[in-house]
Amino acid sequence: MSKKQLGRIIHFANLPLKLLLPKSRENITEVAFKTVPSASKIEIKRVLESLYGLQVAKVNTLNMEGKKKRVRGSVAYYRRPDYKKAYVTLKEPVTLPANLFPFNMAEEKNAATSDDKPSERSESSK
């Protein structure tokens, strides 16, 4: 069989992408991802466009060395694995859903419980 008979073939790389926490959830034009060092800019762009439906304008990458950590109680060191950081600029701004990061929910619960506690203390002191 020739490639013309097979039709269009799309290969997806086994590419883990970890979204790094943005400063705000609304009108995001640039997002940062942490991925494996072997990932190329083209692979990152194709995965984001085909799997997640994002319109990517450009991809900038940085190769990051893993931190050198000291083993507790000895003179030995170990290194965390190397990774690649990808800064992706989007053509259209995106808004992330509120439940994407659980940190916001925990902060809201703490704020709600802290508002209730002072009123209870003031009543108990009377």
Image: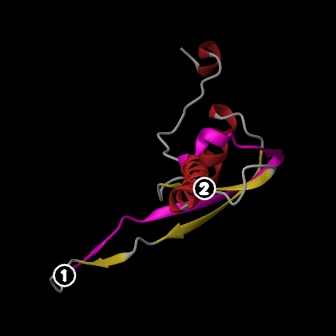
Crowd tier of the residue under label 2, counting other residues whose Cα lies within 10 Å: few below 14, some 14–19, many 20 or above: few
Q: Quadrant of the C terminus?
A: bottom right
Badge count = 2
Name the one closer to the observer, 68 or 114. 114
Q: Amino acid at mark 2?
A: Ser
Q: Amino acid at mark 1?
A: Ala
Label 2 element class: helix
Which disc number belongs to residue 119?
Answer: 2
Residue 20 in the image: above or below residue 76:
above
> How far from the left and from the top, in percent, is residue 71?
21, 77
Q: Residue at x 41, y 70 (%)?
A: 66
Image check: 38 left or right of 77?
Answer: right
- Residue at the disc numbered 1: 76
Label 1 element class: loop
Region of the chain picked out in magenta, as a range: 76-102
Which disc number belongs to residue 99?
Answer: none
Q: Outermost residue toward the front?
A: 126
Image quadrant where residue 22 sits: bottom right
Q: Residue at x 77, y 52 (%)?
A: 28
Q: Is residue 10 visible?
A: yes
Dot placed on the residue nearer the N-terminal end, 1 or 2:
1
Residue 43 in the image: above or below residue 10:
below
Q: Is residue 18 visible?
A: no
Q: Residue at x 42, y 66 (%)?
A: 82
> How far from the left and from the top, in percent, is residue 115?
62, 55
User: Which-is-in-front pick, marks 1 and 2?
Assistant: 2
